[in-house]
Amino acid sequence: MDVFYGIDCKNTTKKEVALAKPDFWKNSKNYYDLKSYWRNLFGCNVHKLAIDAGFTCPNRDGHVAIGGCIYCDGRGSKLRQKGELPSVADQIASGKKYYKPQASKFIAYFQTFTNTYAQVEKLQAIYDEAMAQEDVIGLSIGTRPDCLGPDVIELLGGYAKKYHIWVELGLQSIHDKTLQFINRGHNYQQFLNAVNALAGSGLNICVHIIIGLPEERDEDVLTTARTLAALPINGIKIHSLLALEGTALGEMYKKGTISMITKEKYVSLVADVLEILPPEMVIQRLTADGYHDIFLAPDWAMNKLDVLNSINKELSRRDSYQGKHYIRIKN
Ligand code: SF4
């Protein structure tokens, strides 16, 4: 039996075996990206269609806290900013039209705010509407660890019997001191409870983390990575902290009370993190997205392609790849 480093190292009869770059990725990258994963799983190109279903967030509306995470601009999607939201079906239809040349199957990605923050009947109606659209093969539900009651997990687990379902948990760091500083409104234990409740229900779990959080040392980031590597997590999104106009973090940046991570440090830390993660963990994102109109810093983060190329180059320079320092312990 394989046992993963960090879960059970007590058995002295096990010996550590370092991993080689796996063939199953079937890609030329130094990590297992989402597109490759889906091509391997479904034999075709799959695209995630972002949907704003009109949810809010308990960390903004006073249910958990007011004001939200210090980096959150609270505006919702571009679609919401334009006015009344189109139906889920209409959003999927427009997205499919746009992305159809590049993909033949789609995942409905409920992205904006907390997409499990409603009565389960309402959630079911929204998710059903998405699953009823042609070529939609699954869901990806962005949410918070404190917003996943047993009824919601049961609902999602039901979809997972027939469809490809991801639950995306915002975490950002495993360190409670950091979570408090960024006003996440939940702690690490609540995240762990959510992972334990989701595990074994047929759902894929993706976790979001941020690199460059105020007062986090390199070792704090690596501890977050090592901890996640030992949990039943299937995917990860990593991005750099962004300072945006109109956010508490943006104000701190303008007052000079925080500094932003440099590109060199970010690239190097992402490479370190990827080396620690298991090779099976799907890397769903390595850069931050959007926000051009309210973007303050760091400048380099706006050039996503350059950041991605730099990460891949850094791993090549090290003759390394995702999972190189993830240790399987074999009997
Ligand atoms: S949990 Fe997400 S939506 Fe809610 S305040 Fe934080 S970043 Fe914003």
Image (spheres, helix red, strand yellow):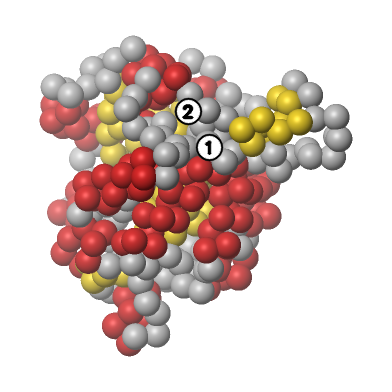
Q: Residue furthest top?
A: 43
Q: Quadrant of the C terminus?
A: top right
Q: Secondary structure at mark 1?
A: loop
Q: Residue at x 66, y 30 (%)?
A: 17
In the displayed structure, would residue 49 be above or below residue 216? above
**258 sits left or right of 204 in the view:** left
Q: Residue furthest bottom?
A: 255
Which of the 4 image quarters holds residue 11? Answer: top right
Q: Amino acid at mark 2?
A: Lys
Q: Give x and y (percent) for residue 212.
A: 43, 65
Q: Which residue is mark 2?
A: 21
Check whether the beta carbons of the residues at disc 2 and disc 1 lie within 8 A of each other. yes
Q: Quadrant of the N terminus?
A: top right
Q: Give x and y (percent) for residue 47.
A: 28, 28
Q: Residue at x 53, y 59 (%)?
A: 221
Q: Nearer the viewer, residue 125 or 225?
A: 225
Q: Which mark is residue 73?
A: none
Which of the 4 image quarters holds residue 242? Answer: bottom left
In the displayed structure, would residue 25 be above or below residue 61? above
Q: Which mark is residue 324?
A: 1
Q: Give x and y (percent) for residue 174.
A: 60, 57
**How dense is the environment of label 1, judged by Cα within 10 Å: few (below 14), some, or many (20 and up)?**
many
**10 sits left or right of 181 in the view:** right
Q: Amino acid at mark 1?
A: Lys
Q: Nearer the viewer, residue 131 or 297?
A: 297
